[in-house]
Amino acid sequence: MVGHRPIFGCGTLPEVHIEPSFDASPLTIAHRAGNDPALARAAHDAGADLIEIDVWLYRGRLEVRHTRTMPLLPLLWDRWSIEPGWRPRLLLEELLDALPPDAGTMLDLKGNDVRLPAAILRALDVHPRTGLVAVCSQNWALIDAFDSRPGIALIHSVGKARHLRRLLPHLASHAEVVPVAISINQRLLTADTVRALKEVAVHVMTWPINDAARARELIAWGVDGIISDDIGVLREIVAERR
């Protein structure tokens, strides 16, 4: 059993490689703020530990967006919206250049393109960061591809109940990969679930938490990462943590 401590790291059982480390707990993560440079800067100024950035590999470029492309049509769509796809799209390299080098980033890898991890690593080599860099995805194969890369935190994301049921078997079949963190939708959490997840992860973070009272409840359960769309909530957590 790996001792609980506020770090990210990857390694092999029974030891955990504790690079990179992060002392803050609970962590504050600005949900999707990296998809807009102005929001990303505001989140950094508010003291957010990590700025979440949604990244797709599309036609050889690392595009920053949450929306999906629509087959055969020049449109982008999300659950409740459709927008023109012909407008200029933010690229990861542009965003990294716009952010302070010490800003922590959490790259949420989208889609199923197996070339995405290598493209991310090339971008980070050209645009190096001094702040914490984490990679997160519900496509766990993309996360496992980073296991041999030092200095990058790995986060297995769980969005649905069926993903939660698959999580432990997945980790058992990848015994060489120790999940440095689990990011899970808050509706799947109970106090008992948090305790069980912390048996296999040094960090459990959850989204979307846009109410400070709910954040405090989850922190009391043992959650040590709060992912929020509300910069005010993150600022409040940072202030209380101090």
Image (tube, helix red, strand yellow):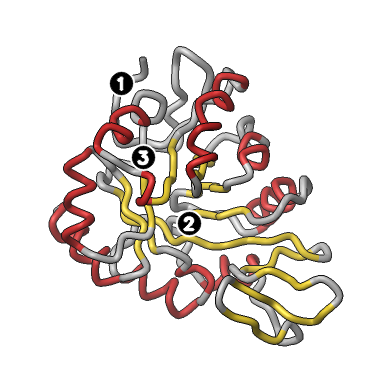
Q: Of circles 1 and 2, which is in front?
A: 1
Mark 1 is on which residue type?
Gly
Q: Which residue is mark 1?
A: 3
Q: Secondary structure at mark 1?
A: loop
| Mark with earlier residue (1, 2) | 1
Q: Report the disc number at residue 204.
A: 3
State the residue in front, 159 or 87: 159
Q: Which residue is mark 2?
A: 105
| Mark with earlier residue (3, 1) | 1
Q: Secondary structure at mark 2?
A: strand
Within 10 angstroms of label 3, few (less than 14), some, or many (20 or more) residues? many
| Mark with earlier residue (3, 2) | 2
Within 10 angstroms of label 1, few (less than 14), some, or many (20 or more) residues? few
Mark 2 is on which residue type?
Thr
Q: From the viewer's perspective, is residue 102 above or below residue 196?
A: below
Where residue 144 sits, quadrant-wise, is top right
State the residue in front, 176 or 129: 176
Q: CA distance from mark 3 to mark 1?
A: 14 Å
Where residue 85 sits, quadrant-wise, is bottom right
Q: Residue at x 27, y 46 (%)?
A: 24
Q: CA distance from mark 3 to mark 2?
A: 17 Å
Quadrant where the C terminus sits is bottom left
- Residue 154 locus on image (x, y percent): 52, 39
